[in-house]
Amino acid sequence: MKNILSVLLVVFLFHSSAYAADKIRIAYPNPNAGIITIPLAHKRGFLKEEGLDAEFVRVAGAPAMAALVNGEVGYYTAITSAVLAAIQGLPVRVVACFIIAASPTLVARPEFRSVKELKGKSIAVGSVGSSPFQNARLILSHFGLDPDKDVKLVAGGTPEVSLGRLKQGLVDATVVPVPFDLYAKKMGLTVLARAYELFSFPSLGLVTTTKKIKERSDEIKRVIKAGIKANRYIQANRDETIQFMMEWLKTDREVATANYEYLSKASNDDGSLPEKGIQLVIEEAKKAAKVSREISMKDLADLSILREAQRELGIK
């Protein structure tokens, strides 16, 4: 009897360990529509399908990079921050991209009807090097304005603060993420351009360290696969995704619907990193870091694990 109990105990422990999910910690910046891929993968069970149990930590910028490098978190979702960090020498790499275009939207006082009319005017853009700052420069360039000479870019603070300054006439325009363009229109302001309708600018995906790539490639592959499954779910299930965003972002249906309109256009279904878009991210990061040397893709991204994940999912 004692021997039988011993065998049963061994079998129990074996099965418990075999089916125990690997725990991972994923950091994300401020909550917005672009970051929902992995949280939705958790909610819909895609992470569980890959044998993973995720804990989410809200942290952004330099503290996020420090937490990643120190091993306090295993993954981060902001590609733009990772590219800047990699250029500055930190051992971090982009391993997948889930959002191929950023949400910043250029809004202005009602008397302005086109981007070109902002020549000589002031534009609030958040902090230098931030996604709003980078996308403001790219939007202006797209419409033929030199962001260094033709306009005055000023620190804007949070989207709420920037819209308040714009409404008060303290600046002529600002750049805010979705869904603040919805709030801007309700305030009587004019939406002049949306970054995601003009160019690719990979902003959110999956970032980890070179150490983890060497030591836990299988785990990374499973996270990537869950993310791809989530993005495919997003594109195929509008109402369910809107409902999830209402819960995750703690917002109403109108705002969640506006978020979905952006997300449906900006998400991809294979985790790939658009080459032309990442070059824009690199160039803007180089300017922020005051770096002039050539930066190659291998300096900031490792897509070998992504390709394995794609093959296993039948993606060519």
Image: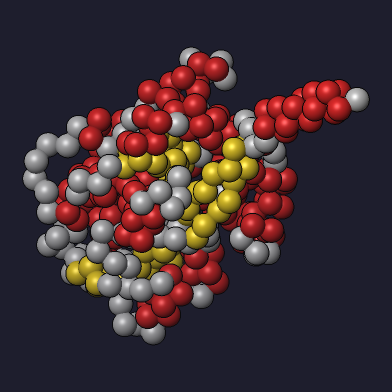
Q: Residue at x 23, y 35 (%)?
A: 299
Question: Taking 287 as reference, is 93 above or below it?
Answer: above
Q: Nearer the viewer, residue 257 or 8?
A: 8
Q: Nearer the viewer, residue 200 or 311?
A: 311
Question: Taking 82 as reference, is 97 above or below it?
Answer: above
Q: Residue at x 43, y 21 (%)?
A: 307
Q: Nearer the viewer, residue 243 or 210?
A: 210
Q: Nearer the viewer, residue 133 or 113?
A: 133
Residue 138 in picture, x, y percent from top left: 27, 51
Residue 312 in picture, x, y percent from top left: 55, 17
Examine the rendering and report whether any part of residue 246 can be seen.
yes
Examine the rendering and report whether any part of residue 100 can be seen.
no
Q: Is residue 19 left or right of residue 300?
A: right
Counting the numbered discs, the total is 0
Q: Residue at x 75, y 27 (%)?
A: 10
Furthest residue in direction right, as rendered:
1
Q: Is residue 173 left or right of residue 177?
A: left
